[in-house]
Amino acid sequence: MQADSASPEELLASLGEAAQHLLFPSESDHPLEPFRSRGDASSPAALRAAEGLAAETPVEVTTLDDFFAPVLDPPAEAGEAAQADAGRYQQLADLLERHLADLRVYRVGRVDIDAYVVGRHPSGAWLGLKTRVVET
């Protein structure tokens, strides 16, 4: 992460703009939306507490690279639109990496999964993106 003067609100606005009209592909495509945690999101337990989730809610932790891999390098048969969107997803990933430290992805739940792409802003706030992924 590079030093940056963007406030949390400015970064959330930039993320919203960069993600506009992008749908994250799964069995049911959903938009990527700016996200600000209500509290600490440094661990699965902290995220559960901050977002008011039950302690037994399953949370899988993965990396930004693993999460974005399918959209950054779509198969040729995915079509021209997917190829064009790959560049926009790369810009989004770059924006997250430039402005946030300790980036991680939390996949919350099973089948109908809430995915939180979060990192720590220099202000201490946990920010990023949220989407839904459906995997049956």
Image (cartoon, grey):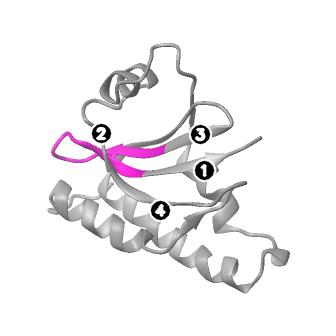
Secondary structure beneath dot 2 equals: loop
Neighbor class of circle 1 (other Cα within 10 Å; few <14, some 14-19, many 20+) is some
Magenta highlight: main SS: strand
Q: Which residue is mark 3?
A: 113
Neighbor class of circle 3 (other Cα within 10 Å; few <14, some 14-19, many 20+) is some
Secondary structure beneath dot 4 equals: helix
Residue 10 spot, x, y in % from top left? 19, 64
Which of pointers 1 and 4 lies earlier in the amino acid sequence? 1
Q: Which residue is mark 1?
A: 67
Q: Are marks 1 and 2 in contact (CB under 8 Å)?
A: no
Could you give the CA–CA distance between mark 1 and mark 2, rounded to whole angstroms? 19 Å
Mark number, residue 93: 4
Q: Amino acid at mark 4?
A: Ala
Which of pointers 3 and 4 lies earlier in the amino acid sequence? 4
Question: Which dot, 1 or 3, sits closer to the camera?
Answer: 3
State whether residue 1 is above or below residue 115: below
Could you give the CA–CA distance between mark 3 and mark 4, rounded to whole angstroms? 20 Å
Question: Which dot, 3 or 2, sits closer to the camera?
Answer: 3
Question: Which dot, 2 or 4, sits closer to the camera?
Answer: 2
State whether residue 56 is above or below residue 15: above
Q: Range of the magenta residues?
A: 116-129
Residue 101 spot, x, y in % from top left? 34, 46
The answer to whether 28 appears left or right of 3 in the picture is right
The residue depicted at 20 percent of the width and 61 percent of the height is: 4
Q: Amino acid at mark 1?
A: Phe
State whether residue 123 is above or below residue 111: below
Q: Amino acid at mark 2?
A: Ser
The answer to whether 80 appears left or right of 34 in the picture is right
Question: Which dot, 1 or 2, sits closer to the camera?
Answer: 2
Q: Which residue is mark 2?
A: 37
